Image (tube, helix red, strand yellow):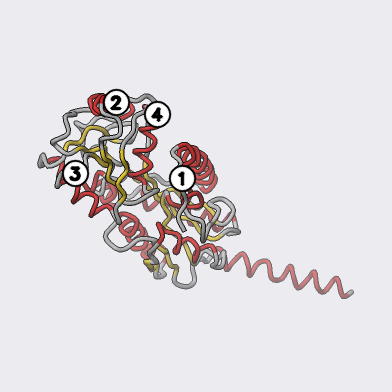
């Protein structure tokens, strides 16, 4: 009889558990952003938070937990309860950080639940006007004629711009001298000043300087031209198979229930389909995406394999 009453008690709890999950959220939700306000990570998180707050009738708050290329925010997410009330606006660092840092390592597939890929944002290969190259082929010719003389600025070792350059070098067997900076701003300033030759900034960060002729855009890293720079061809037209797209996506702690994850993913997908939201993303140079948790998980696995090969081949040493 004892076992019977235990079973009855368990079954009585099931409807309550289902109701609680279907009613999600019943309290404020937080989205952690690993970078400071002003960048696209923060912007994307706040756009979604505003829309989700209205849709859910609950506050969705963005918390900026900056540092270590998103490691701090990611670690905090991984340690949180898997109940959907702590989410993380992740980016490419989620898959590359385990190979670039020796501390606070988090496995992108084991320590997190993939919810939805939010957006893709390409970089653009830019050169200072003093560099005698008007397109990618001419730049590669200069690099081969004078090996190890062209300098590439980046926002830091392991940053998307740095890895974009490393992939191009590996695929074309040229060599740039990498000059890491503490952020994209200082890198762009030195490029504008002619202290370095080239860089791979985001389109949104460099489009004004390109249009004003202060920098020369010679190739976008995505497979098709960007609406923001329609006259700049993809690098892949000169280097077959080359493609790099910076990505942003929502993940939660490992172990989130599948139906809850699907519910949040579906809501994000609906938000990204709203014309006003799409237009806001496109103004930032980003393409809104939205996909299923399984599709995002498969994407993370592919991204991890791709950059592991690049980081190993380029002999990029991990930092503390």
Q: Are marks 4 and 3 in contact (CB under 8 Å)?
A: no
Residue 318, visible in the rendered structure:
yes
Task: Work out whether mark 4 precedes mark 3 in sequence or the reverse, and give the earlier one.
Answer: 4
Disc 4 and disc 3: Cα gap in Å?
26 Å
Task: Work out whether mark 3 precedes mark 1 in sequence or the reverse, and give the earlier one.
Answer: 3
Q: Which mark is residue 207?
A: 3
Q: Tag 1's secondary structure?
A: loop
Eye-nearest disc, 3 or 2? 2
Find residue 203 and report its horizontal and vertical position in percent.
25, 43
Task: Work out whether mark 3 precedes mark 2 in sequence or the reverse, and give the earlier one.
Answer: 2
Disc 2 and disc 1: Cα gap in Å?
41 Å
Q: Tag 3's secondary structure?
A: helix
Q: Which mark is residue 144?
A: 2
Residue designated by label 4:
171
Eye-nearest disc, 3 or 1? 3
The answer to whether 27 appears left or right of 48 in the picture is right
Asked if 254 appears above or below 15 in the picture, the reply is above
Image quarter where the N terminus lies is bottom right
Residue designated by label 1:
291
Find residue 108 and report its horizontal and vertical position in percent.
53, 52
Disc 3 and disc 1: Cα gap in Å?
28 Å
Q: Residue furthest left?
A: 212
Residue drawn at (34%, 51%) of the image = 156
Q: Tag 4's secondary structure?
A: helix
């Amino acid at each position: 009889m004892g076992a019977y009453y235990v079973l009855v008690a368990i079954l009585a709890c099931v409807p309550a558990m289902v109701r609680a999950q279907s009613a999600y959220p019943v309290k404020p939700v937080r989205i952690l952003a690993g970078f400071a306000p002003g960048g696209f990570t923060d912007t994307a998180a706040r756009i979604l938070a505003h829309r989700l707050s209205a849709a859910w009738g609950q506050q969705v708050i963005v918390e900026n937990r900056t540092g270590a290329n998103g490691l701090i925010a990611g670690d905090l997410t991984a340690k949180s309860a898997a109940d959907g009330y702590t989410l993380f606006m992740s980016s490419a660092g989620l898959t590359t950080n385990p190979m670039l840092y020796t501390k606070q390592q988090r496995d992108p597939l084991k320590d997190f639940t993939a919810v939805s890929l939010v957006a893709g944002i390409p970089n653009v290969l830019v050169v200072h006007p003093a560099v005698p190259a008007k397109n990618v082929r001419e730049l590669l010719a200069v690099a081969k004629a004078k090996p190890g003389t062209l300098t590439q600025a980046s926002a830091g070792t392991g940053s998307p711009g740095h890895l974009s350059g490393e992939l191009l070098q590996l695929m074309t067997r040229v060599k740039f001298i990498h000059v890491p900076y503490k952020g994209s701003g200082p890198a762009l300033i030195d490029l504008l000043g002619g202290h370095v030759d080239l860089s791979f900034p985001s389109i949104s960060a460099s489009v004004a300087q390109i249009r004003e002729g202060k920098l020369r855009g010679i190739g976008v890293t995505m497979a098709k031209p960007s609406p923001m720079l329609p006259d700049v061809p993809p690098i892949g037209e000169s280097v077959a198979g080359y493609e790099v797209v910076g990505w942003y996506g929502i993940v939660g702690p490992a172990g989130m229930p599948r139906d809850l994850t699907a519910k949040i993913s579906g809501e994000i997908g609906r938000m990204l389909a709203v014309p006003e939201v799409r237009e806001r993303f496109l103004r930032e140079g980003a393409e809104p995406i939205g996909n299923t948790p399984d599709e995002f998980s498969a994407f993370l696995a592919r991204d991890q394999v791709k950059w592991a090969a690049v980081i190993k081949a380029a002999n990029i040493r991990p930092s503390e």
